[in-house]
Structure formats: C-alpha cells, structure tokens
Image (spheres, rainbow, N blue to C red):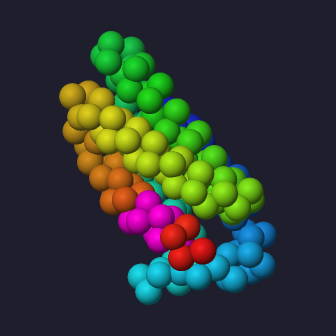
Amino acid sequence: MKIFISVVSCVAIGFLAGMATAEAIPTWYVTLNKPFFNPPNWLFGPVWTVLYLAMGLAAGLIWNQSTTNPLAKGALTIFVIQLVLNGSWSFFFFAWKQLLLSFFVIILLWLLIVLCIRRFRPINKLAAYFLYPYLLWVTFASVLNFSIWYLN
C-alpha cells in the first residue's frame, strides 16, 4: 500500500507540473530559441511518466522500511523536499517564464536527488537505483534549461 501511495503521489505531482507546462508549450515555449539537442516536445510526457513511476517505487520501498530503519524517515524527508522542488520547477520555467531562476531551482533539485540517492542506498539499494535515470534526466534537463536561458 505504501508503494501504491508513493507512486500515486509522485504521478500527481507530475500531473500538476504538467498542467503548468501544457499551456505554455504551444504559445510561449515554441517561440524560444533552443539548442540543437532539444528533444521533441512529445518525448517529455512519456519520459516524465516513467520517471515519476520509478520515483514512487523508490520512495515506497524506503517507506516500507520506515518502521525498522531509523534512517528511512530522514531519507523520505529529503525525497519529499526534492519532489516539491521538482514540481515547482515547471512553474518557474513554464508558468512564470523565469529561465534563469528555474536553472537555479533545477541545480538545487539535482543536488537533492544526489543526496536522496546517498540516503536511500544504505536503506535499500534498489530504491537508490530507481533514482539514477531521474538523476540522468535532470542532468540533461539542467543543461537544456541553461542553454535555453543563454540563447534567449
């Protein structure tokens, strides 16, 4: 049940972030100068869906151990903070059109994902492994965010 709640929570954050994003894609985002490595817009939804599912599985695995492992609560706290920051990035970038500020948000997010992986690993290695694709995508998204800011 904890895994289910974690997955639903992560997907819900993704849904809210998507709502902030959806309106800006066909109006504002298409007008921006983008680097040559900018993926097609249709790719973001499926990638983020898979990532939110993996994040939810990771958090659920840690939450399952929260009664037996004293490190789990702290790890989950960091996870929740990074999840809120993850959702807020879409508002900074797409809804509020703050390209540079969103870059700082995503860098902080990246650091919290690294910290989360470090905290998850001693509790459940599989949970930590579920976060590596997320870290890789946010690394790419950080470069993309910076490039879009620089080009505009």
Q: Is residue 78 magenta?
A: no
**Rendered residue at 54%/81% (across/down):** 34
Residue 110 image offset from top left, x and y in percent: 40, 47
Q: Is residue 8 visible?
A: no
| The C terminus sits in image quarter | bottom right
In percent of width and height, residue 45 lies at 57, 70
Instruction: Name the residue located 45 percent from the left edge and 34 percent from the top edge.
Output: 79
Q: Which residues are magenta?
A: 140-148
Q: Which sits in the foreground, 97 or 126?
A: 97
Q: Quadrant of residue 19?
A: bottom right
Residue 140 in view here: yes
Q: Main secondary structure of the magenta part?
A: helix
Q: Is 43 above or below relative to 115?
A: below
Residue 111 percent across, percent down from the top left: 38, 41
Q: Is residue 87 above or below residue 71?
A: below
Q: Residue 88 vs residue 71: left or right?
A: right
Q: Nearer the viewer, residue 53 or 86?
A: 86
Q: Residue at the spot x=36%, y=36% of the render? A: 116
- Asked whether, in this view, residue 25 is left or right of residue 129, the answer is right
Q: Position of residue 87 (x, y in %)?
A: 61, 48
Asked whether, in this view, residue 68 is left or right of residue 122, the answer is: right
